[in-house]
Image (spheres, grey):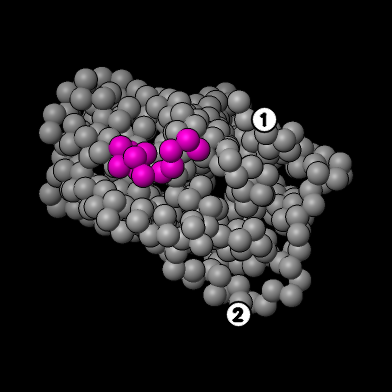
Amino acid sequence: MVKFKPEYYLLCAVTFFVGLSFYFLVPIIPLFLKNIISVRDSDIGLVMGVFSVGALLSRVVAGFFLDRYSRYAVALISLLLMTLISAAHNFAAGVLPFLAVRIAHGFFWGLTATSLYTIVSDVIPESARGMGFGIYGSMIILAMSVSPPVSIYLYKAYSFQRVVFLSAGLACAAILMLAVMVRSGQAVPANNLRLGFSEYLENLTDARIMSLGMLFFAVSFVFTGVLSFILIYAAQSGIPRPGIFFTLYAAATVVTRPIQGILYDRQGPARLIVFAALAGIAGFWLLGADMAYPAYCGGAVLLGVSIGVLFTCPQAMAMDIVAAGNRGAANAQLSFLSDVGGLTGGIILGRVAGSFGYSRVFMISALLFAGLLAYSRFYVLPRYAIWKKG
């Protein structure tokens, strides 16, 4: 059994609390905008969407700071600013102030998330990279599962303002844990003050990471689009208790990630990625072909298993092939491609659903995953074996 360093477990706790803080706000902001300050539906979409713009901008510069300066310092400063911006939601009255707050929140969320992923990349031993990323990645899924129902309950029972301050309080707990790591001397990353921005841009466009990042892009493209309207499709199909989808999906993801991590460390990524792509194909086919309750639940489990592997393996593969000093750029590149995939998937698949119906979207998603399987099996995996040998 691999023993991780104490800072690894602290980083898992930090990420869990950061996730709780973030997902406390996600479900209640639209409710507040619509019900309290009477913002139009079209403007609500704009306010929520600009968050992604801020996150994308942060990915471009995050790697430079992380590869040039102390990664812990970058994480601590970005988390502190994210906490302040979280609290600022209480003082934004109207669409324009909310737009500014959402862009800033997206920027510092993206910088914080990239920083923490890069730091944990340094902490995880090479022999346990799969398990390390598997367990660490489950923290956000757990936070995503716990926060929304609690947040909505507190919003209805108390007020938007109290939930926002609670969100900021959870982020403060993460700040304290991260500060303990810095103060205790556990944070000693190598600085590269000679790194210029032009050199960083070369690292940011590493063709090897781009190849792996296209897996992130494809998975985010499909999953973000599909998960955006799964509940609408379920309601139209008469599925009882449609929220069970996200419970099963999250549970399957959390269970899968540590298991796939152990298998990754023992036998590498090839079989795992093929299996995950096949699980995704089967899950989308079930949802598109037979929208009965057993198929609905089975599809949720299969998609949870698929995403549990496909959002962890490429990350570990990237860290296998990049130098330690370039991990910031690599994580920023992967996160950027994932964000772009999510943005474009939501737009394009939403339009497809509007024109051809939801069942067709699931069948198209199955075909896209078949393409992802072919891309992985015949392009990425053979090259990864060469890249890893150096």
Q: Nearer the viewer, mark 2 or mark 1?
A: 1
Residue 182 appearing in the image: yes
Q: What type of secondary structure mainly makes up the magenta span? A: helix
Residue at left offset 37%, top offset 32%: 304
Q: Position of residue 219 (x, y in %)?
A: 35, 49
Q: Which residues are magenta?
A: 265-276
Q: Is the Cβ of the residue at disc 2 closer than 8 Å to that at disc 1?
A: no
Image quadrant of residue 235? top left
Q: Position of residue 16 (x, y in %)?
A: 62, 35
Q: Which mark is residue 198?
A: 2
Q: Is residue 364 above or below residue 10?
A: below
Of residue 230 and residue 140, the one placed in the foreground of this image is: 140
Of residue 227 and residue 13, the one placed in the foreground of this image is: 13
Q: Is residue 40 left or right of residue 67?
A: left
Q: Name the residue that disc number 1 marks.
A: 3
**Of pointers 2 and 1, the one earlier in the residue sequence:** 1
